Amino acid sequence: MIAKIKNFFLNFFRKKNPNIFDYVTFIKNMKKQKKGLMSKKQYLRIAKRLSEISPCNLLVFGLGDDSYLWSKINNKGKTIFLEDSKDWIASVNDGTLDVEHVVYQTSVENQKDIGFIPEKLEFSIPNRVSDLTYDFIIVDAPLGHQPPRPFKGPGRMSSIYMAFKLLKKGGVVVIDDMGRPIEKQYAFHYFKEENLIDFIEKKVGIFQNPDKNSK
C-alpha cells in the first residue's frame, strides 16, 4: 500500500513537471541489466538525497555505469567525475560525462605508513576541480582491496581526505564500502561518526558536514 501511494505521488509530480528525472525507473532498469555495483536499496537512498539537493555542485570519485544516474539527477547542476584509469574512461564515457583523469600516489597496503599525513594523501587535481566547493560528493573509488582479499589498488585514503577538503559547509558526502576497515577508519576520522546520517546495509555511509571550522 505504501509503495502504491509513493508511486502515485511520484507519477503525479512527474506529470506536473515532466523535466523531473525518474531515477527510480532508471535504477530498476540498471539493476535488471546487472549494472552498477551497489544494491538497488543503496542507489535509491543516495539518489533520493541527491535529488533533494540538486541542482548542485557534485563531485564523484570513480566512474561506472551508475555515473549516468548521478549525472542525470544533477543535470541542471555541475557534475565532475575523477577516474584513475584511462582505459576505463574510454570504455565508459560516451562523451556526455565531464571526467578528469587523476593519478593517486598511495598504495592500500601501505595505509599504516600513510596514516593521516596530508602530504602523503594529497594528489594533483585540475584547478577547475579544486577551485570549487561541493554540495554533494560520492566516494566510490579508487580500487582498494584489503584482507581477506589480497591488497590491491591505491585505496580510498586520499579520495576520502580530498572529499573532506572539498565538501562545503552543510554538504553531504557518500562513502561506499564502509564495511571495510580502511574506509570506515578514514570516514570517521574526517567526517566524524556523529555526522553519519545514514548507513545503508552496513556498507554505504552518508555524512552531513555541519561546520568545517569545528573539525
Image: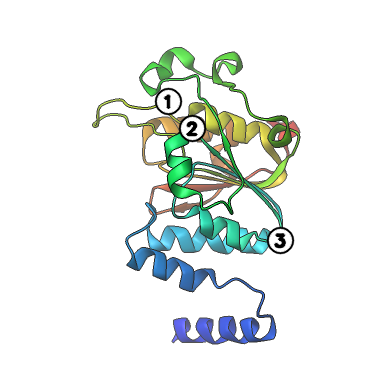
Badge 2 crowding class, 10 Å Cα cut-off, few under 14, some 14 to 19, many 20 or more, is some
Q: Secondary structure at mark 1?
A: loop
Q: Position of residue 69 (x, y in %)?
A: 52, 60
- Identified at 66% across, 61% down, the residue is 75
Q: Which residue is mark 3?
A: 76
Q: Is residue 16 left or right of 159 when viewed as pictured?
A: right
CB-based contact (under 8 Å), mark 1 and mark 2? yes
Circle 2: residue type: Asp
Give the mark nearest the N terminus, 1 or 2: 2
> Residue 107's mark?
none
- Dot 3 surroundings within 10 Å: few (below 14), some, or many (20 or more)? few
43 vs 192, nearest the viewer: 43
Tell me the residue at 64%/82% (across/down): 13
Whether the residues at callouts 2 and 3 have beta carbons within 8 Å, the answer is: no
Q: Earlier in the sequence, mark 1 or mark 3?
A: 3
Q: Which mark is residue 84?
A: 2
Q: Callout 2: helix, strand or loop?
A: loop
Q: Quadrant of the N terminus?
A: bottom left
Is residue 140 among the parts visible in the rendering?
Answer: no
**N-term mark: 2 or 3:** 3
Query: What residue do we see at 52% from left, 25% from top?
Result: 103
Q: Which residue is mark 1?
A: 154
Q: CA distance from mark 1 to mark 3?
A: 32 Å
Q: CA distance from mark 2 to mark 3?
A: 26 Å
